[in-house]
Image (cartoon, rainbow, N blue to C red):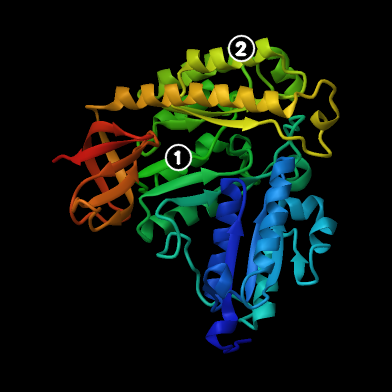
Amino acid sequence: MSRTPDVQSVQVAFRTLGCKVNRVESESIAADLIGRGARVVDEDEAAVVVVNTCTVTGEADVKARKAVRHALKAAGSPLVVVTGCLASVDAASLLALDARVVVEPDKSRVAARVAAHLGLDDVPHGHELRSGADFRTRSMLKVEDGCDNFCTYCIVPHARGVPRGVPLQEAVAEAAAFVEAGAREIVLTGINVGRYRDPATGADLAALISAVGATGIERLRLSSIEPPDLTDEFLAAVAAVPAFCAHLHVPLQSGSDAVLAAMGRHYTAEQFVERIAAARAALPGLAITTDVIAGFPGETASQALETRALCERIGFAKLHVFRYSERAGTLAAAMPDQVSPAEKSLRAASLRLTGERLRARYLAARVSGHARILIERSHAVDETGTPLAYGTSADYLRVRVDALGLKPGEVVSVRLVRVEGTGLVGEPVG
């Protein structure tokens, strides 16, 4: 059934919080709605605002409710459709915010509910790819959902359920469509992407990477992968895929074996070190980034120093530092010896200083080297008249390229000439 509502009434906005999986799910919902005739706009222009929530920590819950309240204040008194992990575990608190709030935990139903409210077509007319002009240059492909690690600080397995893989043929077909549409880089993403299995054949993540690599994509990377999933077999398989980028995000969380055990992590500090060494041996020039948590319940000052020392020993290219945030419903929230907020802040600040030193060291080591940069945004000139373009290297460094005529989606070879802030400056070669 086709309808022809006026332009103003078919405008929808998105506010996405949390992980990359949420972002790709929001982009998929937007693509579906564009296919039905909707226009994606800013919140203050929208008739409906979709808020895709995160619930990984107590702070995430606060941010989610704040985002809903902000959307409710937008011009036009819009309907606010809330989805995501918080919608799955605490719909009541969201519904209590306002009568204009609709909670839809099932993301596969969000587009249809928004379309019904806006008076749009019942089904999309045509397939809108998320690599189009309205979406990011880097194309993310969700291949897995769910997690069964049940880390003691994390509610996500309760919100998303057990691991479930997208059928391999379906994922490869979508990747091939991205390539045909002009995508230069694909990121395979999931909640615990290392647990990917094809539901029909049991093919694993390495098989999926090999198949996506064969589509002709120029660059292929993962959003993150857990340490135990960096098996020798996995590393050997991805090393044979020319498109696979020399960057892995591998969460450490703590450098203390006692804290790792309390977190419910499935490795020791030395096992983490051994897996990173194996990854670097298999993938020369590999950059490793990581997540660490400061102030987990029961963490002592000396255990916090173990984390800092292990980060220095490994030499990460970047640290993402998080203060432990209590999440109701998790085992960690009920643990004794909670670390004080002031002490958590001090430990997080110390880790961030370590991360800044490691980042500066990694950047300095890359100066005078060469890289292929995927341009993601460009400007005609800066205030001094210099043409500017910005992009990323295969090892996930932000690089400014001073050159005329570069456009998003282009890949350019550069010589890395100097450090600039937390990134590099490159000059085109060849």
Q: Which is nearer the eye, 298 or 226?
A: 298
Q: Which is nearer the eye, 208 or 178?
A: 178
Q: Is residue 181 above or below residue 308?
A: below
Quarter-wise, where is residue 328 in the image?
A: top right
Amino acid type at circle 1 is Arg
Residue marked by disc 2: 306
State the count of labels. 2
Mark 2: secondary structure: helix
Q: Is residue 73 left or right of residue 311?
A: right
In front: label 2 or label 1: 2
Position of the N terminus, as image quadrant, is: bottom right
Q: Which mark is residue 221?
A: 1
Let me know if residue 99 appears in the view.
Answer: yes
Quarter-wise, where is residue 338 in the image?
A: top right
- Residue 333 percent across, percent down from the top left: 82, 32
Q: Is residue 193 left or right of residue 373?
A: right
Mark positioned earlier in the residue sequence (2 or 1): 1
- Residue 136 percent across, percent down from the top left: 43, 56
Residue count near mark 2 (Cα–Cα under 10 Å), binned few <14, some 14–19, many ≥20: some
- Residue 165 percent across, percent down from the top left: 63, 45
Amino acid type at circle 2 is Glu
Q: Which is nearer the eye, 333 or 28?
A: 333
Q: Is residue 376 left or right of residue 106?
A: left
Quarter-wise, where is residue 13 in the image?
A: bottom right
- Residue 20 percent across, percent down from the top left: 56, 47
| CA gap, disc 2 and disc 1 | 30 Å
Mark 1: secondary structure: strand
Residue count near mark 1 (Cα–Cα under 10 Å), binned few <14, some 14–19, many ≥20: many
Residue that protrudes farthest toward the front in the picture: 342
Residue at x 60%, y 16% (from the top left corner): 307
Residue at x 46%, y 30% (from the top left corner): 237
Q: Which is nearer the eye, 45 or 193?
A: 45
